[in-house]
Image (spheres, helix red, strand yellow):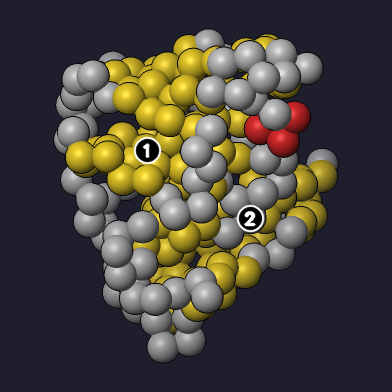
Amino acid sequence: DAMVIQNPRYQVTQFGKPVTLSCSQTLNHNVMYWYQQKSSQAPKLLFHYYDKDFNNEADTPDNFQSRRPNTSFCFLDIRSPGLGDAAMYLCATSRVRTGAETQYFGPGTRLLVL
Amino acid sequence: GQNIDQPTEMTATEGAIVQINCTYQTSGFNGLFWYQQHAGEAPTFLSYNVLDGLEEKGRFSSFLSRSKGYSYLLLKELQMKDSASYLCAVSDSNYQLIWGAGTKLIIKP
């Protein structure tokens, strides 16, 4: 089945220790997104890639970086995690970026910062 | 600014009908989505509306009024597995999804 996969499902890191979250997709979609979602809050878009074109949201902290080495994979790097970065990180994909395009989400990675 | 409003929490009884409302103010409109999100899991797509009116899909229906900036999700014959958060999201003029915080639906036997 075509899907969006995220690893790991749970990640524990220490304050200030770099961490990388990964996402892969078998849908062959052009667009990949990273969202941060805290409890009972709306998902917050951090950035997205349209093919190789990187688009950073204006309010995404510099502490967050992303890489997309090929169509299938996308990584979220948090250079120096703080306690406030503990959240669920959701990867999503869409075929293109138009109004009618559904975004398909992976299961998420829950990040805990100690 | 852009804003999506939906109730924080609703409670309903198994077998009943519930309507979850969503109002929005966005810069541009390219459609409205409803997603279901179970606790600790990722959102899953339920429906998409871009024209006014009602879209029915099994037990779930979604309604849109663009002139009023209003949508609702109607869930019929509620089942315990419908206990989840329901998120409303609007695609704006830049095709960015503006998300509501979600409505937590609690189903009681």
Q: Residues within 10 Å of mark 1 (few under 14, many from 20)?
A: many
Residue at (43%, 36%) from the top-left corner? A34
Residue at (46%, 42%) from the top-left corner? A46
SS assignment at label 2: loop
Q: Which numbered disc covers residue A25?
A: none
Q: Nearer the viewer, residue A90 or B44?
A: A90
Regarding residue B42, the answer to whether it shows in the image is: no
3D distance between C-alphas at marks 1 and 2? 18 Å
Q: Nearer the viewer, residue B45 or A94?
A: A94
Q: Nearer the viewer, residue A35 or B82?
A: A35
Q: Residues within 10 Å of mark 2 (few under 14, many from 20)?
A: many
Horizontal side of A101 relative to A22 (left or right) equals left
Residue A90 on image: x %, y %: 49, 32
* Residue to which mark 1 is pinned: A33
Q: Give the amino acid at mark 2.
A: Ala
* Residue to which mark 2 is pinned: B101
Which subunit holds the residue at mark 1? A
Residue B41 on image: x %, y %: 59, 29
Q: Nearer the viewer, residue A114 or B80?
A: A114
